[in-house]
Amino acid sequence: MNDNVIRLVDTVAREKGVDRELVFQNLEQAMMSAARKYFNSLDLEEFGCAIDRLSGQISLWRNLADGSREEINDPQRLGRIAAQTAKQVMIQRNRENERNSLLDEYTKRRGELVTGLAQRYEGNALIVQIDRAEGFMPRSEQIPGEQFQPGDRVRCLLLDVRDAGHQVKIVLSRAHPDFIRKLFEAEVPEVSERTIDIKAMAREPGFRTKLAVSSMDAKVDAVGACVGVRGSRIRNIVDELGGEKIDIVRWNESSQVLIANALKPAEVEEVSLCFELGRATIIVRDDQLSLAIGRRGQNVRLAARLTGWDVDILTPPEFQKGLQILEETVRTVPGITDEMLDRMGALGMISVFDVEEVGEPVLVQECGMTPEMAQQVVSTCAERGRAVAEQMAQEKAAEEARRAEEGAQADALLGGEGAVATDAESEAAADSILGITSDEPAQG
């Protein structure tokens, strides 16, 4: 019996991952609950139990009213009902200890990179077996379009651990930016050793990630170390992410240089910063415009998040036009000097819209204008801004109308007004344009 107790305690402690002493305490509580059940007692202090930690000898007794105690030499005589009570108490307390053990263990591991096996999907959440616990990955923390089959290996970030009453909820993520950071720490020794520091990061899961890195050692090239020989290191990370693109740019304390780096592979001609508005105006050539903006604005959007600036991209003609309108408008105010205009440009004001946003106090403090002059400049620019906005709206409407007309002409040419032509109709239209009759073979 005693050996069985020791083996039972060791087995439960090992399988549930709880302290051996806690299992002994649970067993003692279970024995006292069984005795109270057998004697139909509600007094929590009436019974006591002690188990020898080395031999497994169980001592169970009853505290009597006169201060003495009565030994219960044979616990088995308490009967089946009392044994069931002891069993339930033991199970419940072991579950609580196991939950607390899991909570403590995984709370310490929060932010770690873990590897588990996919189990199943519950709704949109993926259930993953990690060590001796199950974690769940909500749809918001999954990479869009990524699917796992039962038994697939899943590498993810242990994002959060929540105490949800009777259970511990372990939240996993593959979409969080820190998942990328941990992958770089695993694949690039210089990052894990802090020789290379990831200064900033912006990510759209499943599509593209931008990282700004710097080296603490002048002999170590931050970008080259992250990419690896012939791209070996970055390739492993991209493969883990299912082909997500990763841009690694060089960090610079100068916001102008950093923004230009962040917009790569596009070539930037000039960067104008407006600290008052937190906006960076980027000038690029016409042939670099689409590259700077990126597909559906992704490149410029990630660059803005990476640098912390609102990024506005213009071509040189657009930039010069905005400056020209601003200068023409401001010069109508009496007393405006070239120095004041230069200071406005140095502050990053490049259009009449900026002046109203910046406001009068900045014009007075930074540009040397009188309060009356600043007020007139703001009101004049606001009025001109409304006219420019109206003109831009008209030009946009005209452009949309032109495109709609071209689309209608194309539909008419293909024999359908706004309708999609069938293969036969398209072929007939093409034959008509080429001068091929229905019974003549097309000439190669």
Image: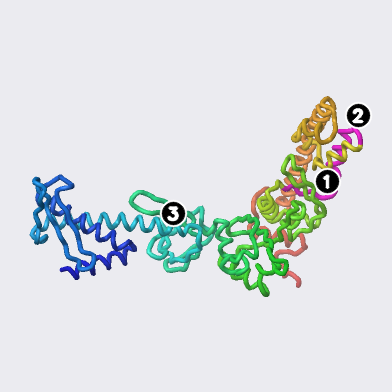
Q: Quadrant of the C terminus?
A: bottom right
Furthest residue to the top?
372
Looking at the rendered structure, the kind of residue marked 3 is: Val
Cα–Cα span, label 3 and label 1:
50 Å
Instruction: Tell which of 383 and 256 is nearer to you.
Output: 256
Q: How many marks?
A: 3
Residue 414: mark in rendering:
none
Q: Which of marks 3 and 1 is nearer the N terminus?
A: 3
- Label 3 belongs to which residue? 161
* Left-right relation of 306 to 260: left
Question: x, y (%) of residue 388?
Answer: 80, 36
Q: Quick check: can you spot residue 4?
A: yes
Corner quadrant of residue 201: bottom right
Q: Nearer the viewer, mark 3 or mark 1?
A: 3
Q: Quadrant of residue 427?
A: bottom right
| Coordinates of residue 295 in the picture (x, y in percent) | 68, 56
Range of residues picked out in magenta:
311-337
Q: What residue type is labelled 1?
A: Phe
